[in-house]
Amino acid sequence: MSNRHKVFVSYHHANDQADRDKFEKICTERYDIMVSRSVQDGDIDPNLQTETIRQKIRDGYLRDSTVTVVLIGSQTWQRKHVDWEIGSSIRNTQLNPRSGLLGILLPSYPLVNGQHNPRTIPPRLYSNVQNGYAKLYPWTTSATQLQNWIHEAFLRRNTHTPDNSYPTFVNNRSGSGWT
């Protein structure tokens, strides 16, 4: 398949590892849609200081990626590292060019009457869906669909301006949604 991109996958490691594994299996092993630039379980010591973890992710994983896919489960919006990964992905610097961005609602994401609750989508991702830089999609196992979504996100990074104005999470959040 053509249009292969280097993809960073952002997700809630404790809750959504199995879905992330399925996504990567479809995209890298079965169909060769993408080169994974994701942090694998055990790659980074979770006991390190937050800033050290962020530096390792930025310099070791995000720098080389061209698209960031956010896998959205029931608590993904609460995670400080997901918020930070999105923010780093859409910032355009000399060492780290801006990446395309998209979100995929996982099967575990709680739809209400078939709809997502904007307050349970990571806020930095949601503001970029609102301005057209990013898009949200339902879970699929269609390699063709995933490849199209990733490639479209790659193209949008040069035709839209991202919104990175949401305040960076200092800590993980709790509750039923952000405000």
Image (spheres, rainbow, N blue to C red):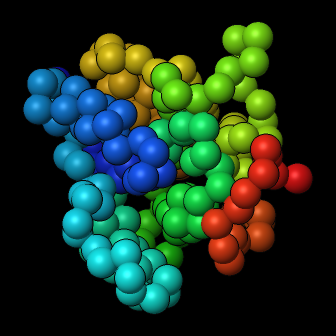
Residue appearing at x 77%, y 31% in the figure: 117
Kindly identify the residue that appears in the image at 15 percent across and 24 percent down. Answer: 31
Q: Given the current orientation, which residue lies at the most extreme top position?
A: 113
Quarter-of-image position of residue 105 = top right
Q: Residue 14 versus residue 35: which sits nearer the camera?
A: 14
Q: Nearer the viewer, residue 139 or 172?
A: 172
Q: Is residue 163 above or below residue 101?
A: below
Q: Is residue 40 left or right of residue 172?
A: left
- The image quadrant of residue 62 is bottom left
For image coordinates 68% across by 41% down, the residue present is 121
Q: Position of residue 66 (x, y in %)?
A: 37, 53
- Specify the farthest residue to the left: 29
Picture coordinates of residue 158 (x, y %)?
53, 49
Which quadrant does the N terminus fall into?
Answer: top left
The location of residue 108, given as percent across then percent down, is 52, 28
Compared with 4, 9 (above or below) is below
Q: Is residue 2 above or below residue 75?
A: above
Q: Is residue 19 visible?
A: yes
